[in-house]
Image (cartoon, rainbow, N blue to C red):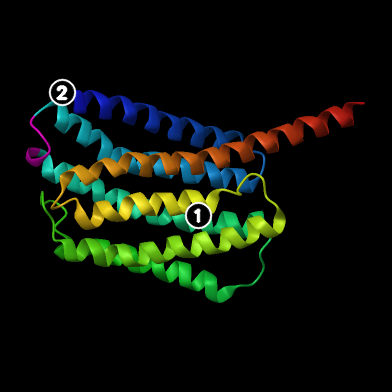
Amino acid sequence: MPQAIGETVFDVFYLGFAMIAGFTMLLKGNSPLVKKAGLMAVLLGAGDSFHLIPRCIALWTSGLEANAAALGTGKFITSITMTIFYLILYYIWRERYQIKGRKNLTISMWGLSISRIALCLLPQNQWLSYRPPLLYGILRNIPFAVMGIIIIIIFGGETKRADDRVFRFMPLAVILSFGFYLPVVLFSGIAPAVGVLMIPKTLAYVWIVLMGWQLYKQSAGEKESLLRRSAL
């Protein structure tokens, strides 16, 4: 019961924040960059809801193993949406720092995204099983991890060069998200307690959304200042 209460409260606040912040940025953002950040946040919240809501229901009812099919379906959907999440983040990087060209990098990100999704679609993943095979859990996360490494490197270089106060901690947030996520992939089957690392992993994603929200507030403040000047 304590686990059910704790996870439910955490998930309600997390999903509510991601969706509200995301839709606010998407609908009220006054630049394509802010709208991309909003879309990314909505995708994060919507994708995770397919896994977290069935998990909460399972904890309050018949347990996780009895709801393996629903949980597995949610994990599958989340795997797809998180891949798209990082692809959008790549385009946020391009727009934020006015990156031109870099065709090979763009092809690499798209190739990794397609590879990750294709691996997720393989029936060998056994998504509906309570204990799916570890091998395919590792395989489908290899291109995903490479995408994360690329995001860390490219944001790390540009945030320093541009002295970007909004996204300066983006590399750290992505490092933390993968640092907490990968042990769960590797060891949760033999040590279920490792699954608790999904909480700080989620908080790392909240941090990323907060950076997008900071961008939204900064953009809104600049627009308001511009309107005031034009009114004088």
21 sits left or right of 183 in the view: right
Residue at the location (57% across, 37% down)?
213
User: For mark 2, what is the residue?
Assistant: 1
Q: Quadrant of the N terminus?
A: top left
Residue 45 screen position, x and y as percent: 39, 39
Residue at the location (66% across, 44% down)?
31
Residue 89 shown in magenta: no
Which quadrant of the view contains residue 12? top left
Residue 201 screen position, x and y as percent: 37, 44
Residue 141 screen position, x and y as percent: 31, 62
Foreground residue among 25 and 206 = 206
Amino acid tagged 2 = Met
40 sits left or right of 70 in the view: right
Which quadrant of the view contains residue 157? bottom right
Foreground residue among 32 and 14 = 14
In this rendering, which labeled residue sits more in front, label 2 or label 1? 2
Dot 1, how many residues are within 10 Å of its Cα: few (below 14), some (14-19), or many (20+)?
Answer: some
Residue at the location (32% across, 67% down)?
142
How many discs mark residues in the rendered view? 2
Above or below residue 226? Residue 143 is below
Q: Determine whether the residue tagged by mark 1 lies in a helix, strand or loop.
A: helix
Tell me, yes or no, whether the two marked residues, 2 and 1, touch with CB atoms within 8 Å: no
> Is residue 97 something one can see in this rendering?
no
Above or below residue 150? Residue 181 is above
Q: Determine whether the residue tagged by mark 2 lies in a helix, strand or loop.
A: loop
Q: Quadrant of the C terminus?
A: top right
Which quadrant of the view contains residue 143? bottom left
Amino acid tagged 1 = Ile
User: For mark 1, what is the residue?
Assistant: 88
Foreground residue among 39 and 150 = 150
Magenta stretch: give its range.
62-66
